[in-house]
Image (tube, rainbow, N blue to C red):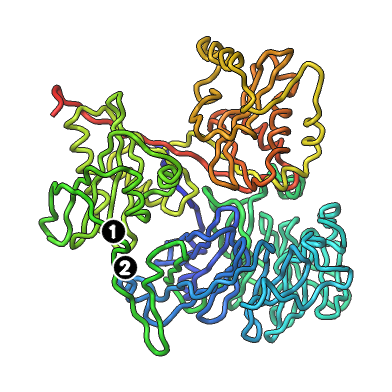
Amino acid sequence: MNKAPTPFDCSYSPQFAELLHNLGISLIISTYQAGKVIILSSVEKDKLIQLPRTFDNPMGIAVEKKALAIATKNEVVVLRNADGLGKRYPLNPGKYDGIFVPRAKYYTGNIAMHDMEFIANKITGVNTLFSCLCNIDDKYSFTPFWKPPFISELVSEDRCHLNGTATENNSIKYVTALGKTNTLQGWRNNKMSGGIIMEYPSGEIITEGLGMPHSPRVYDGKLYVLNSAQGELIRINTKNGTSEVICNLGGFARGMSRYGDYLFIGVSKLRHNSAVFRDLPIAEKSFAGVVAVYLPYGSIAGQLEYTMSVDEIYDVKVLEGLKRPSILSDSSEVHELALSVPGQTFWAQPSEKGKKHTNVEKTTSNSENEKFSYKIIKNVSIKSLAKQFPSLIFPPFLKKTEKRRVPGNFINLAALYNGNVVALSITEIRPDKTAELHSVMTKKEFRRKGLAGNILKLTDEILSKNNIKYTDIVYSDIYEDTEIIEKLIKKAGYLNPKRTVQNIKLNIHNVMKAGWIKEFVKEEQDIEIFDFSELSEADKNELSILEKQKRIPMYLKPFQMPEFINTKISKIAKYKNKIVGWCILHNVNEETLQCSALFVFPEYREKLISKKLMARAFSDMKNIKNTVYQAEYDDKIIINYLNNLFAENDAIDNKFYTIASRKYYKTKDTVK
């Protein structure tokens, strides 16, 4: 039986793991597509481990001895590795030889920061959106200090896609861009051969005609650059501008760092639905991972290839002298316990914040360690439980509790440490004698102690005694704790998780650039598109009859979760005064909608009514930033349709899957 894929699955050559081990280094990579910064280390000569941590659209990474700076969507986060913190990490004492913890955050706004470096005690980077080089500090969003001579003004238009800097002796020497253009995203018109390398600070173009160059670097006085669109590492003759191919890398190359005679280079799997990437020569054979190149011979010494979760890599940096480091993002609570002062570091003790009295019933205790006990939490609403223990509720379910009252019959089981709740599971018993596990979480500092497994086991005993047939669990692969939950439920006896729904997250700003939006907004004879809020009683009766005739798939019915429907943006289509389709959008938050039902009856699909519905809905999304479209995982026709429809202008921000699993029980003859 084939092993079910898990988040961040990868394969790698033994030489790649051995190389990291022998060099005594680790790598840190950023993948804005997956929303992760990942540390790669070799714990044995033939075994790699990886630590993915959640950051918001991470791109450029600056490295300086014991410091990191990571450019995210709206901030630059600074992390430091303080002596002693790693070895005394409370969750795994003695395991790590270093740990990077957040120390500062600069609020830049969305400026699309690309390459970054620490130069002269400053964070210096490439501000791609404003086509300039800038410094990041606490005075301004950014402080520009240079722009190419052909850029006339600082505006948020990504005019030339400035992206990379090469430094020599801690000073900027060269800068790369995807075009010598001075108009809104003008570089896109000649992306295959418009790339340039400029000398800094003169701005003189030393070579041009490159295919989307990235990551320029000066090694031993020679200029190397990634000719990304061709998947090549090339060396530039800075005197006459000619280039020499050192090796082919097999993917869209971006992100490069050197240690000794080896270069570590990131490669990305191209997005076939992207107008930027789909027509590049390497689109069909590209993969996502890291390639190690032996520079003296220009040969590939080993590589890592991702098979799940990661499609695009932006940056790759070497962490020198660290064989097994860790990193904490500011989304994890444990980073708040890492304290450092001049000459001293220590970990604070965890404490319960805002602890309130909760009615609990003791069910069992840990015979090996009386500090732990397990209790059923009774007589408390789910909404109240979520307010008391937000860090112990799985994020999707927590959002649900924030939006509305969650009625139902729940089993809430907690693990306690010295009387404080440190792990919690929430399971709903449904009227049909089945159950759903909505949440199971353990505080990070108490993980790897079997607490979550124990509360699931106790929950199973209760469910089995009450003749419950099975328990379902539904989650997505977008959250940081997904991998932990997957391992937990497998160990608890659940079936191998399976993908059920493909989620496609759209950037509305980019969607609105598509030409078909304006084309299909126009009214046509016999076809009427109107707001869901304008449904008459007769319309509702008509829809009710259609539902009873079972002509509508269950998951595409228009009246699901009516309290969350955005009635002004959701649309209904009529053809000759007869309802023929709808586009129903539910509110997720103030800036995000979820398209839960896009449906047109088959006999009317040739009239392109689905496009008309979407075009009208998009046109009304004045303050909405994102919309998530859902399609059944096996419905390749709809998935391909959506991918092709939103291929232009990088309209697709992200893709993720909804995953489901189930555990069956042997039922009893009587209910106890």
- Classify 10 Å Cα crowding around label 2: few (below 14), some (14-19), many (20 and above): few
Looking at the image, which residue sits at the far left?
367
Q: Count every numbered label the image shows and give the total.
A: 2
Residue 297 in view (yes/no): no
Percent coordinates x, y for residue 96 in the rendering: 38, 72
As drawn, 609 above or below 215: above
Q: Counting residues from the N terminus, which is met first, the one under dot 1 or under dot 2?
A: 2
As drawn, 477 above or below 130: above
Mark 2 element type: loop
Percent coordinates x, y for residue 653 in the rendering: 63, 48
Q: Nearer the viewer, residue 49 or 146?
A: 146
Residue 150 lies in what quarter of the image? Answer: bottom right
Drawn side of residue 206 relative to residue 385, left or right: right
Label 1, label 2: how many angstroms apart (C-alpha)?
A: 9 Å
Q: Which residue, given by chain and number where applicable, does mark 1 sit on?
A: 448
Mark 1 element type: loop
**Amino acid type of disc 1?**
Arg
Residue 489 disc label:
none
Residue 92 disc label:
2
Percent coordinates x, y for residue 606 in the rendering: 74, 19
Residue appearing at x 56%, y 24% in the figure: 558
Residue appearing at x 32%, y 75% in the figure: 348
**Is mark 1 in CB contact (under 8 Å) with mark 2?**
yes
Percent coordinates x, y for residue 153 in the rendering: 85, 68
Residue appearing at x 70%, y 28% in the figure: 613
Q: Nearer the viewer, residue 361 or 596?
A: 361
The N terminus, quarter of image: top left
The C terminus, quarter of image: top left
**Amino acid type of disc 2?**
Asn
- Classify 10 Å Cα crowding around label 1: few (below 14), some (14-19), many (20 and above): few
Q: Nearer the viewer, residue 329 or 512?
A: 512
Residue 497 in view (yes/no): yes
